[in-house]
């Protein structure tokens, strides 16, 4: 049935949407580096780059010429998702790249039957052999993001340590609740990761404390620091763990992956 997941946690790929309606919070950086860390411990991982900007594809070194067939073709049902996925330079990590035509999918899907379920249907038919699927969502609430939330078992939320963080989180929580009620009653929050943390800035500590007060153990203990090497890595087409594994940002994503896996073991136990 369109309205049900055909795969369950423990019985197939675990699908996590990396989402925040606000841009510039480290969403794509978190998606590609978490995926790399999971692949480093021999998990078979697929990233779905659902953002028309294609930053996850660029950050993993996928050339523009290799994106002629991309997530757009899978979402509209033109090409099986398994045929769109390409291997990255990271062993065990594949990506369904984004393409410029993905920006038109929002309009094209408006009149399509079961438009909110197109990505779920594509994933159900084409993710054999993967243990984790991470969907890098656009920084806006449109049909692409709705498709990601409907397809996912859970949501991982990167949250920048800034003044309006909780306000943005409030909007996202309302969105998740609407998706639960209308399309995906099992959707859960896998966790909230605090990003761009600056230990020299008192505001970062204040925001982190506020978020933990509101969301408790949903917030990962690991925080991702503001780090120059993390910012540089995408321009070289590499995750920061490959670009400079010893830097503070890379080490933070390794710790985050450990936390994610611990939570996943509890889910599937």
Image (spheres, rainbow, N blue to C red):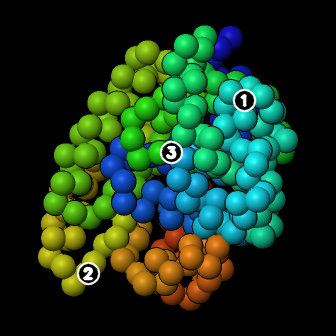
Q: Position of residue 96 (x, y in %)?
A: 71, 48
Q: Which residue is mark 1?
A: 122
The earlier-in-sequence mark between 2 and 3 is 3
Q: Residues within 10 Å of mark 1 (few under 14, many from 20)?
A: many
Q: Is residue 226 above or below residue 49?
A: below
Q: Which of the two residues, 85 or 43, is positioned nearer the viewer here?
A: 85
In the image, what residue occupies the spot 74% across and 26% down? Answer: 77
Q: Residues within 10 Å of mark 2 (few under 14, many from 20)?
A: few
Per the model, the C-alpha gap separating discs 2 and 3 is: 28 Å
Per the model, the C-alpha gap separating discs 1 and 3 is: 16 Å
Q: Is residue 240 above or below residue 29?
A: below
In the image, what residue occupies the spot 73% across and 52% down? Answer: 67
The earlier-in-sequence mark between 1 and 3 is 1
Say which quarter of the image contains residue 33: bottom right
Q: Is residue 169 above or below residue 256?
A: above
Asked whether the beta carbons under mark 1 and mark 2 sit within 8 Å of each other, the answer is no
Give the quarter of the figure containing the C terminus. Answer: top right
Residue 94 in view: no
Q: Nearer the viewer, mark 1 or mark 2?
A: 1
Residue 165 in view: yes
Q: Is residue 220 left or right of residue 67?
A: left
User: Circle 2 — which element?
Assistant: loop
In the image, what residue occupies the spot 22% across and 63% down? Answer: 162
Q: Which residue is mark 3?
A: 137
Q: Which residue is mark 2?
A: 199
Q: Position of residue 193 (x, y in %)?
A: 40, 58
Q: Position of residue 53 (x, y in %)?
A: 53, 53
């Amino acid at each position: 049935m369109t309205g049900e997941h055909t795969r369950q946690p423990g019985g197939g790929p675990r699908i996590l949407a990396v989402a925040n309606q606000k841009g510039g919070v480290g969403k794509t950086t978190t998606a590609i580096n978490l995926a790399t860390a999971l692949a480093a411990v021999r998990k078979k991982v697929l990233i779905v780059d659902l953002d028309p900007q294609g930053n996850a594809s660029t950050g993993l070194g996928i050339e523009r010429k290799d994106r002629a067939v991309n997530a757009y073709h899978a979402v509209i049902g033109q090409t099986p998702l398994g045929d769109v996925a390409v291997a990255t330079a990271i062993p065990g990590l594949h990506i369904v790249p984004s393409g410029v035509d993905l920006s038109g999918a929002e309009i094209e899907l408006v009149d399509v039957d079961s438009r909110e379920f197109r990505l779920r249907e594509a994933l159900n038919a084409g993710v054999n052999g993967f243990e984790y699927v991470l969907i890098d969502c656009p920084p806006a609430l449109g049909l692409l993001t709705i498709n990601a939330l409907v397809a996912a078992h859970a949501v991982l939320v990167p949250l920048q340590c800034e003044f309006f963080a909780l306000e943005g989180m409030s909007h996202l929580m309302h969105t998740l609740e609407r998706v639960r009620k209308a399309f995906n009653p099992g959707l859960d929050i896998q966790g909230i990761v605090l990003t761009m943390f600056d230990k020299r800035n008192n505001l970062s500590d204040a925001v982190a404390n506020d978020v933990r007060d509101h969301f408790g153990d949903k917030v990962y203990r690991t925080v991702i620091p503001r780090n120059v090497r993390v910012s540089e890595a995408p321009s070289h087409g590499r995750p920061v763990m490959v670009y400079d594994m010893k830097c503070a940002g890379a080490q933070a994503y390794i710790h985050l992956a450990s936390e994610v896996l611990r939570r996943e073991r509890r889910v599937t136990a």
